[in-house]
Image (cartoon, rainbow, N blue to C red):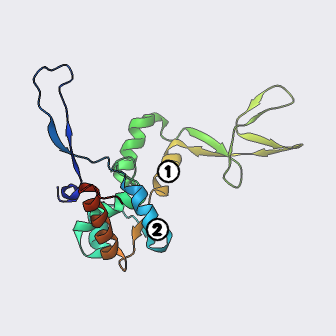
C-alpha cells in the first residue's frame, strides 16, 4: 500500500514458542502520528465539514473534495474513524438489514426508549399507586407523557449522527500531506520530530 510505504519499519521477533524463528521486518503502523499532527496544526483552522451521502467511502470523498483518490487516507485519519462499518453511516438498505439483525424483524418497531419533549431520555417513574409508568415522567409535581422511540428510529438517528465528518480543506491538503510525509520520513530515519 502506498500510504504505509513511508512508515518506519521495525524488526519483530516471532520466536515465542518457536525455536529457530528469525526476526521479520514489518511496517510500524502504530507510530504515534496523531500527536505529531495535532502539535503541528490547529486542525479547527484547516478542516471543513463534509456531509456523507449514501455510497460515499473515503476514496469517493477524496475524489469529490480533492479530485484525487490518493488523499483518501486523510479522511479516516482526521476523523479517527477507521472502521468502515461501525464508523461510517450505512445506506438505507444496509441500515434496515442491520436493524433487522440486531432486534429481529418482529421487534424493529418496538420501543427502544422514551424521551421528554426536548429529546432527553427518560426512564419513567413509579406513580403514587406504586405502578411503574415507563411512558411518563415526573418533573416535580407535574407528570408528563414521554415520546416513545422505536428501535428502528433509534438506529436511524445513530446512523445519521455519523454523516457529518471533517475533511482537510482543499486549500490546505497539499501542505498537510507534505508535512505529514515529512514527519513520517523523519520518524523513519530516527530524527526527533
Residue located 49% across and 69% down the image: 42
Res. 170 in view: yes
Packing grade of label 2 (10 A; few <14, some 14-19, many >=20) is: some
Quarter residue 143 falls in: top right
Quadrant assignment for the N terminus? bottom left
- The image shows residue 54, relative to residue 17, as above or below, that is below
Q: CA distance from mark 1 to mark 2?
A: 25 Å
- Residue 178, percent from left and from top: 28, 71
Helix, strand or loop at disc 1? Answer: helix
Q: For the view shown, which residue lies furthest in the front direction?
A: 191
Helix, strand or loop at disc 2? Answer: helix
Res. 164 in view: no
- Residue 94, percent from left and from top: 34, 49
- Residue 90, percent from left and from top: 37, 52
Taking the image as shown, residue 34 lies to the left or right of residue 147, namely left
The numbered disc on residue 43 is 2
Amino acid at each position: 500500500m502506498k500510504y504505509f510505504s513511508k512508515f518506519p519499519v521495525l524488526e519483530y521477533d516471532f520466536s515465542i514458542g518457536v525455536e529457530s524463528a528469525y526476526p521479520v521486518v514489518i511496517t510500524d503502523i502504530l507510530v504515534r502520528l496523531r500527536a505529531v499532527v495535532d502539535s503541528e496544526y490547529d486542525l479547527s483552522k484547516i478542516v471543513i465539514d463534509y456531509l456523507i451521502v449514501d455510497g460515499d467511502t473515503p476514496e469517493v470523498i477524496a475524489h469529490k473534495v480533492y479530485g484525487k483518490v490518493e488523499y483518501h487516507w486523510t479522511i479516516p485519519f482526521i476523523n479517527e474513524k477507521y472502521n468502515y462499518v461501525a464508523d461510517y453511516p450505512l445506506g438505507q438498505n444496509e441500515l434496515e438489514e442491520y436493524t433487522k439483525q440486531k432486534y429481529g424483524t418482529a421487534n424493529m418497531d418496538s420501543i427502544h426508549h422514551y424521551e421528554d419533549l426536548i429529546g432527553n431520555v427518560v426512564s419513567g417513574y413509579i406513580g403514587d399507586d406504586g405502578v411503574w409508568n415507563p411512558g411518563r415522567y415526573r418533573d416535580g409535581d407535574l407528570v408528563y407523557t414521554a415520546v416513545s422511540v422505536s428501535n428502528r428510529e433509534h438506529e436511524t438517528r445513530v446512523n445519521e449522527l455519523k454523516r457529518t465528518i471533517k475533511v482537510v480543506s482543499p486549500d490546505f491538503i497539499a501542505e498537510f500531506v507534505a508535512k505529514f510525509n515529512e514527519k513520517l520520513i523523519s520518524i523513519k530515519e530516527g530524527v526527533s520530530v
